[in-house]
Image (spheres, helix red, strand yellow):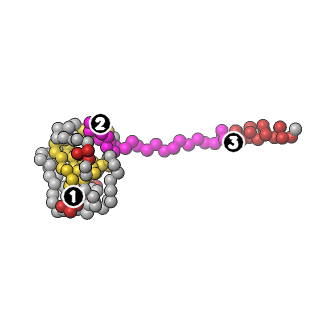
Amino acid sequence: MKNKIIIPVLVVILIGLWSSREVVAPPISPPTPTITIGDTKIEVEIADTAESRAQGLSGRTSLPENSGLLFIFTESSQPGFWMKEMNFPIDIIWLDESWKIVDLTIEARPEKYPEIYLPRSPVHYVLEVNAGFISAHNLKIGDPARFTR
């Protein structure tokens, strides 16, 4: 008979303790910025300072699939890119101020350093992705891109 009384009392105590706990929601992380070209979504890191643009992907050993590094410039220009201290080849997607692809560099390779890669026309954004990305997704000059932060 004692057990029949103890169990319900214990359940009530446990429920009371649990319900009095402060419920803390997990931290909400900001959405990862993405660029969408056609049906392809690319998660991007942003390089929008002189220091982050100078560093680029140098020193890294790889880049996750369907991700990239987006360089954002304060004004349109024809910036030069090189493969200094790079450890893997990349494709470079050159975008104007309206997010249209204006040039493509396929398979920029570390062993080509100090060769400098330049776009054919002024750009406002440059997206570095893994080598082979442009061909795998059939990207072309004139394709529109969409940026979501």
Quadrant of the snapshot with the C terminus: top left
- Nearest the eye: 124 or 57: 57
Residue, disc 3: 17
Tell me the amino acid under the disc marked 2. Answer: Asp
Residue beneath the point at 27% across and 49% down: 129
Q: Could you classify mark 3 by the number of other residues whose Cα lies within 10 Å: few (under 14), some (14-19), or many (20 or more)? A: few
Residue 133, position in %: x, y?
A: 26, 47
The alpha-carbon separation of the residues under discs 1 and 3 comes to: 61 Å
Tell which residue pokes out farthest to the front in this image: 136
Location of residue 136 (image quadrant)? top left
Q: Is residue 5 left or right of residue 118?
A: right
Secondary structure beneath disc 2? loop
Looking at the image, can residue 76 be seen?
Answer: no
Secondary structure beneath disc 3? helix
Residue, disc 1: 109
Secondary structure beneath disc 1? loop
Q: Is residue 23 magenta?
A: yes
In the image, residue 47 sits, relative to residue 24, either above or below, namely: below
In the image, residue 106 sits, relative to residue 23, either above or below, namely: below
Looking at the image, can residue 62 be seen?
Answer: yes
Residue 106, position in %: x, y?
A: 19, 50
Residues shaded magenta: 18-43
**Sequence order check, earlier mark of 3 and 2:** 3
Q: Is residue 25 magenta?
A: yes
The answer to whether mark 1 and mark 2 are in CB contact below 8 A is no
Residue, disc 2: 39
Tell me the amino acid under the disc marked 3. Answer: Leu
